Amino acid sequence: MKIIITGATGFVGKTLVPFLYGNGMNDLCLLIRDAEKARNLFGERNIQYINVLHPDWREQVIACNPDAVVHLATLFNTRCDAESAVEIIRSNLVFGTLLLEALAQTKCSYFINTGTFTEFLYGAGEYFANNLYSATKTAFRPIIQFYQTQSSWKCINVVIYSPYGRRNQQKKVLDFMVDAMHAAEPVNFTKGEQVLDFIHVDDIAGFFHTLLDRLPVFREPYTQLHLGTGQGHSIREVGAVMETVFQRKINACWGGLPYRKNETMYAVAPVAKNLERLGWKAKISLPQGLGILKEELSRPPVLS
């Protein structure tokens, strides 16, 4: 099966690509912006690359003629300014639309899109984005559905919850807590009452491998799956576990930051469909995942 992956050098992608390759899914084509970064991450593996900065990248996608696409590429930030808005829309809507335009001219059978739990401010049943990034993820789905009318692929939308577990250049709350362990002065955090579903990136890679392996079970035009552990932990709870695993105190001022407008206070994945349709559930507990993160951070980073 020929698989195109976007966002391959991002946080999830750089774990997913070696995992798929090492588990027999090695007919991969990566859509990238930085060939040197990709080579540093993936070494001498026999992988095809398409540079999306090249003028004819869409023609290369058509020539690649994939069976399935895993669309991980995204631009995330929570800034509220005109420049950020343009960048987010260009990355999350314009690029995705151009990709779909090319795929409509191929034999692609499955388009696996990725969403975010922050599209569901009040729970997993109804869309209500808590920032522009989340809104663009929701806005992209009708565009996918339109292009389905021009082709015959099945769409599987995977809503990813709170990923963690390895070095992350785009830092999130757990990464800032690790930094705070080494801070001379207390670092301001919110009160940490948010209950989130923290899923290890290795589990995310395992999920996508299982999904790709069992794509034929999805016969309906559109399916949505929520990718998490099904268990919630408050940020303060995670901080306490982290202090035990790392054997170091987080130098935090809890409550030093106010909650943001539209802060997500509860987001735990409804995971029953993953078990029912794929026979899959997360394997890595929070202490195990934080242990993997600790080990990862003890090693020199891969140049990228």
Image (cartoon, rainbow, N blue to C red):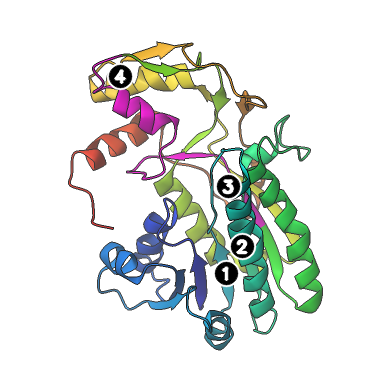
Asked if residue 36 lies in the magenta stretch, the reply is no
Outermost residue, front side? 82
Q: Residues within 10 Å of mark 2 (few under 14, many from 20)?
A: many
Distance from label 3 to label 2 (Cα)? 26 Å
Residue 93 rendering spot, x and y as whole percentages: 66, 60
Three-letter amino acid code of the residue under disc 3: Ser
Distance from label 3 to label 4 (Cα)? 35 Å
Nearest to N terminus: mark 4 or mark 1: 1
Cβ–Cβ under 8 Å for marks 3 and 2: no
Residue sitting nearer the eye, 73 or 18: 73
Quarter of the view holding residue 101? bottom right
The reply to whether residue 118 is visible in this rendering is yes
Three-letter amino acid code of the residue under disc 2: Ile
12 is higher (above) or lower (below) than 106? above
Nearest to N terminus: mark 1 or mark 2: 1
Dot 4 corresponds to which residue? 243
Dot 2 corresponds to which residue? 112
Q: Which mark is residue 69?
A: 1
Residue 132 rendering spot, x and y as whole percentages: 66, 43
Cβ–Cβ under 8 Å for marks 1 and 2: yes
Cβ–Cβ under 8 Å for marks 3 and 4: no
Asked if residue 176 lies in the magenta stretch, the reply is yes
Q: Which residues are magenta?
A: 157-185
Query: Quick one: SS at disc 2?
Result: strand
Q: Residues within 10 Å of mark 3 (few under 14, many from 20)?
A: some
39 is higher (above) or lower (below) than 257? below
